Each structure stands twice: as structure tokens, then as C-alpha cells.
Amino acid sequence: MTETVKYLLDETRIPRQWYNINADLPEPMAPVLHPGTHQPVTADDLLPLFPRGVIEQEMSSEREIDIPEPVRAAYRQWRPAPLYRARRLEQALGTPARIYYKYEGVSPTGSHKPNTAVAQAFYNHQEGVKRITTETGAGQWGSSLALAGAMFGLEIAVYMVKVSFQQKPYRRAFMESFGAECIASPSNTTQAGRAILADHPDSTGSLGIAISEAVEMAVQRDDTRYALGSVLNHVLLHQTVTGIEAREQMAMADDEPDVVIGCTGGGSNFAGLVFPFLGDQLRGGKTMEFIAVEPAACPTLTKGRFAYDFGDTAHLTPLTKMHTLGSGFVPSGFHAGGLRYHGMAPQISHLTDLGLIKPRAYEQLECFAAGLEFARAEGIIPAPEANHAVKAALDEARQCRETGESKAILFNLCGHGNFDMQAYTDYLAGKLHDQEYAESEAAMALSGLPSV
Amino acid sequence: MTETVKYLLDETRIPRQWYNINADLPEPMAPVLHPGTHQPVTADDLLPLFPRGVIEQEMSSEREIDIPEPVRAAYRQWRPAPLYRARRLEQALGTPARIYYKYEGVSPTGSHKPNTAVAQAFYNHQEGVKRITTETGAGQWGSSLALAGAMFGLEIAVYMVKVSFQQKPYRRAFMESFGAECIASPSNTTQAGRAILADHPDSTGSLGIAISEAVEMAVQRDDTRYALGSVLNHVLLHQTVTGIEAREQMAMADDEPDVVIGCTGGGSNFAGLVFPFLGDQLRGGKTMEFIAVEPAACPTLTKGRFAYDFGDTAHLTPLTKMHTLGSGFVPSGFHAGGLRYHGMAPQISHLTDLGLIKPRAYEQLECFAAGLEFARAEGIIPAPEANHAVKAALDEARQCRETGESKAILFNLCGHGNFDMQAYTDYLAGKLHDQEYAESEAAMALSGLPSV
């Protein structure tokens, strides 16, 4: 058997700073606008939603931002995360490429999400917040915030998209095991939810609706704030521990990536791995290829418009310039629940617009096939979201076999598939199909973009 | 927030030898007997079942047995496993006790089972075996052997107890994801299965029946052998990497355990953590308390008889002297599927008979409650099996609060509960009940013990 090669840092190497790519952007980003006035938002505008520590990070252009010691202490439960050289996979593929993957599935919830959940819980706790509301689709983010709430003694209320709430009772049990409250959305606990239910009593919900409910709940109470698991600058910032560790681990392997790959839903796991490397490039370092992989049925970066849009359905959030399929767009029911968002992180959208990130879309069946190929070689079953990154890495490695090039390919294995075995069960039984991109629905959703 | 304290060894500290407690037993064990002749079995008797490398280990009394390099290379994917000081739990309990747990949930299948699966796959592969058959109850062992088969290029056929096969489709998908075949037992692929189905067409199966089927399948083909996931000496031997690492990690913490705890089904995770410490004690080291925790509904050690019995229902296996509830005993349907075996590892039975191990039984509801208490403090949801060890550790720690003693309590958190969220869902919904120990059924099963 080919040897497992793992690069593991000791705890002293948990990063002491997050990396903020805003410091190195070749062109500044478009400002975030107030939904009412269409003027750039101020920190004060955001205070009903977020604690000040988080707002400062959202707006910061400091390159390095200190990670508070209690957050590093929480990270210590699972970080530093291992980086693997996928030697058995390389052998199975017969490729001269060197394939590396950073494995974030070692966290207690099985994905990268706790990297930001514990940070956001810390800042809320520090500023006296008692309760955080949020939304969750597939359940990864809600589970991670539930965990962070248990760690920092905060109440957590999670609005879970109703179709997932019904299909994934285990995710609800997971959140409740950590003491969080989990509410099916749309619900009758909010105006936004009641309005939807009045028109569509059978609504199965969407991420946009759940965000509206969570935001409405947060702004109503003084002791309550809101948390988002992706998209925003501060979330992407918190995820950079992944790339900072990976950079050091690549040096341990005496190697440097030529290609860096991540899947993109809201963009946070991609940014977490990519931004530290991309920042090096922007400051004059080695030129690399950065590939953002999205599902063909929700092709935000490859087919969306780069425009100002709302983050939610009820239009309560600020306006950000991003790649979007329209805030009313509801993608078809494919199995990578974490990649079903209508928008994309503004930072990733901006960098894609500048040509620094190359987006790519895949169908779901080819992603599951790639995931199984990976699992049989490397021993880990990836989350369906992560399969998109796996598929791109396999394609790059196979291309190296054709050309004879020996590229170093690094990808983010952002979570394991332990909670997604229903999808694998269906795939193995031949019950899954590729899902169409609902182009006309996107066109309709895009026609409703705010005029800014 | 109280700090997470994790003791992590680097890869060079993956043990180079397994520890064999047979070298240090104060009295020798009763011999294993041939089921036909009732004479002690020879290595040749076992050759249809196991590869020679495994049989030598089963019968060895060497204290240290070298771990082959390819097995250490496979271990490297997840080992050394972390040892945690449960400071947040200690704080929540207000106990002066120092609580440590060894966490085996970091393996790709989420439990300790791969420690022996990769070793058994290696020896089979080395001796030219092409195919391994086995049984699985809850699915942890079958998943782990499926993983090991993928690593060493072996075909794996898993007979899965029918009730679990139906209730846990995700486990089947997990095994199939690694390329293994998964067959509901009783099946019509074996004589043993057909005999059961003829009498009981609706049989939901048992571990004893599934073992009979797997053994029958193995002895029929020259290129096929059988593997067992617990009970036997060589399986317990392979698990000692857990305790050997934990001993070094306790030294890093500048501490020594006073109490060492594990849950017991067949006994392998318990032995894995306990035997290296117990061996030290037997050779004149510190005296510790060793607590084996079992479910009250399958109380093998606390209520079973210490006698010769078969390992399976069809009486194909050798006879071993062990604590048993009778090979025909089928426990009621509690949720710790890994603890439902009628027998107990002969080594653990022997050491319990000698008074060196203290058995204890708990009901399932109190174990789930303990598991949630642990999860909210430490951030990891334990497997229902592991909850038994958690419950005992909590009880010991609470007793320290009463007495003011500051004991060092070490337990094996042998797996996470990611695949057991149905049980937690039912527990949180108030749908779980304690299960009675079917005493009259055990009496009937025990009346059928072989006369040796």
C-alpha cells in the first residue's frame, strides 16, 4: 500500500492573525449600500445586526487582524487541521501531478464552518449579547453555530429551510444536542415568515427567506444579534486560518501550489484556502491558478450578473455588489445544499471580475463519481459540496497525465460526507439525476434587481 | 471560555509494537477448544478462517508484537489520536477530578474499529487472500473493514444484521462507497441463513447469525478468509495502540490515571485503552481501577455466566471460556448496537474473573443524558456506545465532588455519534425508554451451553 502522507502542525502553529485580502486588492471594492438610502452603510447602520468587533472586521483594510486568545483556545479542539498529500489517489490516476488536500472535516461538526462560528460567538459574548439568530440550509452552519453557542454560553436560534428541516431531522437533533433552538422556515414567528405563509402556505422555504426571518428576529431584541455563515468579508476573513496553515504545510512538503481549488456556495471555504495564497501573488509572489467550482444548477459565478443585490428575499439586508442570480432565485433540488445560494461573496465576485479567480461549473453526477473515486483511494467520503472541488482536482490531475506536466494541485476538502449518506445512497442506487439550471427563473429573478 | 487542552503526539510516536497482555497474566487463560473434539485448537484448525499472521498473534504470549510498516503507514491517516483534558466538563461539574478522554472518533469511520481492520487487511493481503467476509451489527465494524479493504485492494463482503440493514441504509451506503458488498442477514447465500429463513422467514437477524453466515462463506473458498471486529485476542491486541498512545499523552500532562474506563460490547475498545495500563500494574506499577461499562439490557459481565460457549448461533466457531448470556440470546432493541453481543472477550472475562476489572451496567436513558452533558461541555457528540463510558466517568467525577478527592479519570471516547443521530432524535423527542434485560431468555439461552 502506498504510504499516507500527512503534514500536521503542532498547536503553537495555530495562526495568530487572520489575513484580510482587502489590504492587497488591486482595485477597491464597490461600497456596501444601505437598502433604504442607497448610500454607503456606516458601522452604526450595522449595529442592530452585528457586534462592533465583527463590524470593524467587515470594514477593515488592515492586512493582519489578531485572533483573540479565547478563539485560538477554541480552535485548539481541532486545529491545526491536517494537510494530506494524496499519494494513493495520484497512483490510482497515474498522474505526474502532486495532489494535496487540506482537510477541514476534522472539526466537531465535520466542516470548515466552526472557524467563523467560534469567532462570531466570541465577539458577541464579549459585547454582552445573549442570543444569536441565524439561518441554515443543509445544516452545517447551524450545527457549527450551535456548537459555538455551547462553548461561549450563548442562546442560539436557527431558522432552517423547511425542506431541509423535514429531510434532515438528524441535523436538527445535532443542533438541539448542543442546546440550540431549531425552527422550520418560513415560520409564523416573524412577519417575513407569516407573509410568505399567507401567500404560499405550503412553502418549503429558501435560504433567502430564512435569512429574512433571522435578521428580523435579531433586530427586534436588544440582547440579540444575527450571524451569517458565509458571503461577508468578516466570515471569509475568519476562514483564512485554513490557507495560512496550508501555506506552512506546503512548505513542510517543500512544495508550492500551481493550482488552488475550492467549491463555492457563498464562498467562505474557497476564500479561506485561497486568499492567503492569492494575497502572496498580489504582493508579487508566485502566480497561481485559482479555480472556484460551483454547481451547474446554481451557476452564480459562471452565469450570474455582477450587480448590486440583496442577500435575502424580504430585502432587509444591505445591498452588495456581487455575482447574483437574483435574490428571488430558488435553485433546483440538487444535493450540495451548501452551494444553493443565489449570490456570492462580494470579495470573490470582485476578484473574479478582475480575472484573478477562474470559475467553473460541474453537474452533480460527475461530482459524486469523483467523490467516490477519491474515497476509495484516500479513505474519506467527502461532503457533496466538497465533491465539486474534488472533481476539479481530478480533472486537473488527469490533464497533467495527458500533457506530462507535474503540477502541484491543492484543494480544500472542506467537509466529510457522514451527514450526507442519503445522497450517496440515492447516487449508488442510480436515483440521482443532473439538475437543470432554471435559466428562465434566473432571468425573472434578475429582472427584479434593485436599480442602484 | 475555559481553554481546550489537547495532547497530541507527532507521527513518529505512532506505536511500533502492540502490547500483548497474555505475557503478563497472573494466571493462564483456559484454552480455546475445537467445537467438534473439545480439544484445544491448533493453529492448523484456524487456517480456513484466518491468515497465519493473525493466528500467530491470537496464540502468542510475546509481550511486544511488531506493527508492520504498511499498517503504521495506514494508521498515519488519523493516528496518533488526540487525548483531551476535559476542563470545560470539569468546570461544568464543579469537580476536583481531572477528567481525560482519548478520542478515537478522528478515524475515517469515526471509531476505534479501523485500528484492527487495517491490520487484519494487511495480513490477509500479505498471504494472498483476495476476499474477506465479516458480519456487522450497527455498521461500525463493516464500514471499517470496507475502508481497510479499499486501502489494501481486497474484496469485502459484509453480512449485516437485517434489522440494522433496514434501519441504517446510510451504513450500507458507507460500505458500498468504499466498494464493499453488504448483504442483509439472514440471507439465502448460506446454509446457515437458509436454515434460519426456513424456520423464521421474517427473522430480523442477530450478530450470532451473521457470524455464522460470514464464517460459512469464508471456509468455502480458498481465496477467502473471515475477520472479526472484537472479542478475539488479536483484535484486542491491535487496539492497544490506543492505550500506548494515551500512556505517553498522560505523561505529557504530567499525570497518571487513577481510574480507567471503557464501554464493553465484545471488549475491544475497552481492552485497547486499558490493557497497556493494566499490564504496567501487573508488572508492579501503580494500582488503578479499571471499569468496564455495559448496557443493563445486555449485562454480559455483570449477569452472564463465565463458561465455555460458542461465538455464533450456528455453532461453527471454536469454544471459548467467557462471560456469556448464551449464544442464542438476542438482547432487546436498545440503541447502542455495538454493545449487543451475547459474549465477551475471553481476556476481559478472565481478568474480570480475577477481580482486576470491575464491571458496571447502566440503563440507556441515563447514558444519553450523560452524552448530552458531555457534548455541551466538550463539543463532541459521543456514539451511544461511548455514552456508557461517559456516564461512568461523570459518576466518578461527581463522587469526587462529594468526597473532595482529586482523582485522574481517563476514559475511551471510542467514537462520535454522527451516524447515530436517529437515536438522539428519538431521545430528544422523549421517545426512548430503558430496555429490560430479558432474564428468562438469557436463562433459556444459558441452559443450552455446551457441556465441556
Image (spheres, coloured by chain):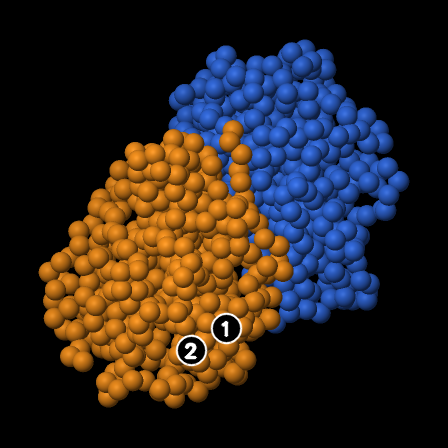
Chain colours: A orange, B blue
Dot 1: what SS? Answer: strand
**Could you tell me which residue is drawn at 25 percent across and 51 percent down?**
A361
Tell me residue A59's x, y (percent): 39, 79
Which picture quadrant has residue B285? Answer: top right
**Could you tell me which residue is drawn at 53 percent across and 83 percent down?**
A128
Please tell me which residue lies in front, B411 or A251. Answer: A251
- Which residue is denoted by mark 1 in the rendering? A65
Question: Outermost residue, front direction?
Answer: A284
Q: Is residue A3 left or right of residue A263?
A: right
Question: Outermost residue, right direction?
Answer: B284
Please tell me which residue lies in front, B369 or A203. Answer: A203
- Which residue is denoted by mark 2 in the rendering? A60
Q: Is residue B129 above or below residue B288?
A: above
Q: Residues within 10 Å of mark 2 (few under 14, many from 20)?
A: some
Q: Quadrant of the C terminus of chain A?
A: bottom left
Please tell me which residue lies in front, A356 or A208. Answer: A356
Q: Amino acid at mark 1?
A: Ile
Q: Residues within 10 Å of mark 1 (few under 14, many from 20)?
A: some
Task: Return the disc, 2 or 1, that comes first in the chain's sequence.
Answer: 2
Tell me residue A318's x, y (percent): 29, 79
* Circles 2, 1 touching at the beta carbon (< 8 Å): yes
Q: Amino acid at mark 2?
A: Ser
**Could you tell me which residue is drawn at 52 percent across and 29 percent down?**
A1
Q: Is residue A377 left or right of residue A212?
A: right
**Could you tell me which residue is drawn at 51 percent across and 18 percent down?**
B129
* Residue A144 shows up from this direction: no
